[in-house]
Amino acid sequence: MNAQLERCNKLINNDENEIIIYCLGAAIQRGILLALQLQERHIAFNIYTNTLSTELIGNY
C-alpha cells in the first residue's frame, strides 16, 4: 500500500484537487485505510465515500 500512498502524495503535490480511489471486494478495506492516511497527512482534504453495486454478466 506504500506505493499507492506515495502515488497519491505525488498527485497532491502536483496540485491535483481530486483523487478517486476505486476498490472491489477485499480491497475496500485497504482503500479506506489509504484515504484515511491521506487525510492525516493532508488535513485540508476531505473524504467522501460512496458505494454502489454493479451487475456482472458473463458470456459462457
Image (cartoon, helix red, strand yellow):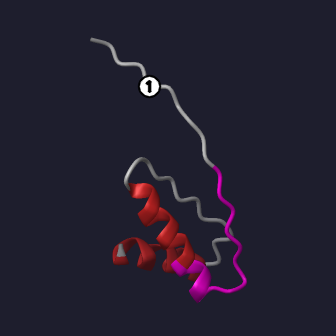
Foreground residue among 25 and 2: 25
Task: Establish if 1 lies above or below 31.
Answer: below
Location of residue 55 in the rendering, given as x and y in whole percent from the top left corner: 50, 26
Location of residue 23 in the rendering, given as x and y in whole percent from the top left corner: 46, 52
In terms of secondary structure, what is the magenta stretch mainly? loop
Residue 45 in which image quadrant: bottom right
Foreground residue among 19 and 51: 51
Location of residue 43 in the rendering, given as x and y in whole percent from the top left corner: 68, 86
Q: Which residue is mark 1?
A: 56
**Mark 1 surroundings: few (<14), some (14-19) or many (≥20) residues within 10 A:** few
Residue 48 in which image quadrant: bottom right
Residue under the image location 67 percent in, 68 percent down: 47
The quarter in which the N terminus is drawn is bottom left
Q: Is residue 48 magenta?
A: yes
Q: Amino acid at mark 1?
A: Leu
The magenta region covers 37-50
Location of residue 51 in the rendering, given as x and y in whole percent from the top left corner: 61, 47
Residue under the image location 40 percent in, 71 percent down: 4
